[in-house]
Amino acid sequence: MTNRNIEYWVIPPECDAEFVAHMENVLETYEKPYHPGRPVICMDEQPVQLIQETRQPIPATKDHPKRVDYEYERGGTASIFMFCEPLGNWRQATAREHRTKFDWAEEVASLLDGRYADCEQITLVLDNLNTHTIGAFYEAFEPQRARSYARRIELCFTPKHGSWLNIAENELNSMTRQCVGGRRIGELEILQHEIAAWSTDVNNTQRGIDWRMKIDDARYKLKTVYPKIQC
């Protein structure tokens, strides 16, 4: 994003052992061969503003584009949850009113009970937020059920200032550009319908995700991130 003479980037730190450790853990996870019983899933979240029209838009004609009144009303906020399986040619976008530990636990549980019900374990790549914890299952479900989920999930956290390592962030950016960006969506139910339709369409037309960066690439291209060893 550019603002006058400023370019905004996620600038990685220098000589940060914790960043390197988490980064290499994520990259090593992406290098694992596909295993249908132990798939790698990526997830990310994005808050969105619900915008309602104050006047009915005028449909486009052959002479004029669609006309929308400049005035609008804020309809509250929502949170989009993006899940994708890089080697499985699959992604899913859902929306909720909030993004609490309870919401996160319910979203993950729905995957473990649904698409991945027959998997012995999944690895979930995600940002290290305070809502992304195994303890969230215990806040949302009774202990026996929570423990059953905890046994079947391995969390792989991206480093701070390293969200670009999360493939789900790329999918979320694509969904924003192709589906909700520049549109006024005023109700949660409509948002849910629109992003579900996007997920279905992309799953039907797009192949899997080809992640190219390996650990050796990171060690060469991101040398400044690695600590200098004192001999």
Image (cartoon, helix red, strand yellow):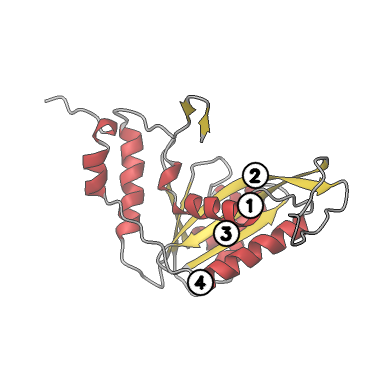
Q: Residue at x 21, y 48 (%)?
A: 216
Of mark 2 and mark 4, the one earlier in the sequence is 2
Tell me the number on the disc at residue 80: 1
Q: Secondary structure at mark 3?
A: helix
Q: Residue at x 74, y 49 (%)?
A: 184
Q: Nearer the viewer, residue 149 or 201?
A: 201
Q: Residue at x 32, y 40 (%)?
A: 21
Of mark 2 and mark 1, the one earlier in the sequence is 2
Structural crowding at the residue carrying mark 1, measured as other residues with C-alpha within 10 Å and reported as few (<14), some (14–19) or many (≥20): many
Identify which amino acid the numbered label 2 is placed on. Pro
Q: Are marks 2 and 4 in contact (CB under 8 Å)?
A: no
Q: Secondary structure at mark 1?
A: strand
| Mark 4, residue position | 205
Structural crowding at the residue carrying mark 3, measured as other residues with C-alpha within 10 Å and reported as few (<14), some (14–19) or many (≥20): some
Q: Nearer the viewer, residue 189 or 26?
A: 189
Q: Nearer the viewer, mark 4 or mark 3?
A: 4
Q: Nearer the viewer, mark 4 or mark 1?
A: 4
| Mark 2, residue position | 47
Q: Are marks 3 and 2 in contact (CB under 8 Å)?
A: no
Q: Is residue 137 visible?
A: no
